[in-house]
């Protein structure tokens, strides 16, 4: 194993300080790590996602293709976040989304089968599953509510406030798609804010 991979795994496992030595040993034996190139897919629409991914390094974009053939960005996944279409993953149904690497990525993998085995073998692991579900639900709810209750400018300002590290890593095309506005509108918003 590459030294940096070992470091990524050690950092990931620090989240599980509540586990017993036996539980930690099982989890560690179930993990694998994989590198993906830029523009490579972690999963694609129509596929059943059989592994949950934890991003140790890199940035991914979740998107779908609408009925007009346009790519619509629904989210970005960066370091220390989970790359998943969680509702499809937990039901083991085909995803409606693509998950594409915008940068070279290193992702820690845990299979659906191993997650289920961990739940059955150690009840404390169910808490971990609940925490992931809560994180995913919070992200999805925040995005939905931003479209219901915020203007395009407010969505942009909140993105800048909550994800400043992504501004130089995400293209304006992907960002405008994520914010639900045309690229020209995003440019106008950015110009207006810069003049303030």
Image: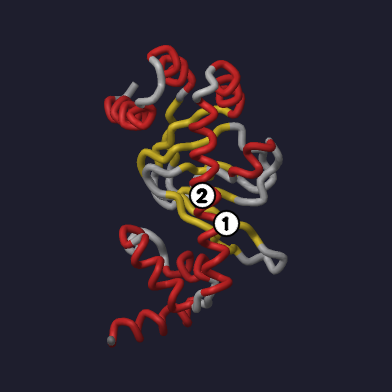
Pick out the residue farthest to the top: 22
**Judging from the image, what secondary structure is the residue with disc 1 in?**
strand
Task: Kindly indicate whether the residue at mark 2 contacts the one at mark 1 (C-beta within 8 angstroms).
Answer: yes
Dot 2, how many residues are within 10 Å of its Cα: few (below 14), some (14-19), or many (20+)?
many
Quickly name the residue at label 2: 100
What percent of the width, then of the height, locates residue 185? 47, 82
Instruction: Residue at 57% x, 56% y: name it.
Output: 63
Spot occupied by residue 35 in the image (x, y as percentages of width and height): 42, 35
Q: Crowding at label 1, few (<14), some or many (≥20) Cα neighbours within 10 Å? A: many
Residue 25 picture quarter? top left
> In the figure, 1 relative to 161: above or below?
above
Q: What residue is at 61 percent from the left and 32 percent from the top?
A: 50
Q: Where's residue 31, x and y in %?
A: 46, 24
Say which quarter of the image contains residue 92.
Answer: top right
> Relative to residue 19, is residue 68 drawn left or right?
right
- As displayed, is residue 107 above or below residue 19? below
Q: Residue at x 51, y 53 (%)?
A: 138
Drawn side of residue 50 relative to residue 156, left or right = right
First reached walking from the N terminus: tag 1 or tag 2? 1
Label 1 or label 2, whichever lies nearer to me, is: 1
Element assignment for label 2:
strand
For disc 1, the marked residue is: 63
C-alpha separation, residue under disc 1 versus residue under disc 2: 8 Å
């Amino acid at each position: 194993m590459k030294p940096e991979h070992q470091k990524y795994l050690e950092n990931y496992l620090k989240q599980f300080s509540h586990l017993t030595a036996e539980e930690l040993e099982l989890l560690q034996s179930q993990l694998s790590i994989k590198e993906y190139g830029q523009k490579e897919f972690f999963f694609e629409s129509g596929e059943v996602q059989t592994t949950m991914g934890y991003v140790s390094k890199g940035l991914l974009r979740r998107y779908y293709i609408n009925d007009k053939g346009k790519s619509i960005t629904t989210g970005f996944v960066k370091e220390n976040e989970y790359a998943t279409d969680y509702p499809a993953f937990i039901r083991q149904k085909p995803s409606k989304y693509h998950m594409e690497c915008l940068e070279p990525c290193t992702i820690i993998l845990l299979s659906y089968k191993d997650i289920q085995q961990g739940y059955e073998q150690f009840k404390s692991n169910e808490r971990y599953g609940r925490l992931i579900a809560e994180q995913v639900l919070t992200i999805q709810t925040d995005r939905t509510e931003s479209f219901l209750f915020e203007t395009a400018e407010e969505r942009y300002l909140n993105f800048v406030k909550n994800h400043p590290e992504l501004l130089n890593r995400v293209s304006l095309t992907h960002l405008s798609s994520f914010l639900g506005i045309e690229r020209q509108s995003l440019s106008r918003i950015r110009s207006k804010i810069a003049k303030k």
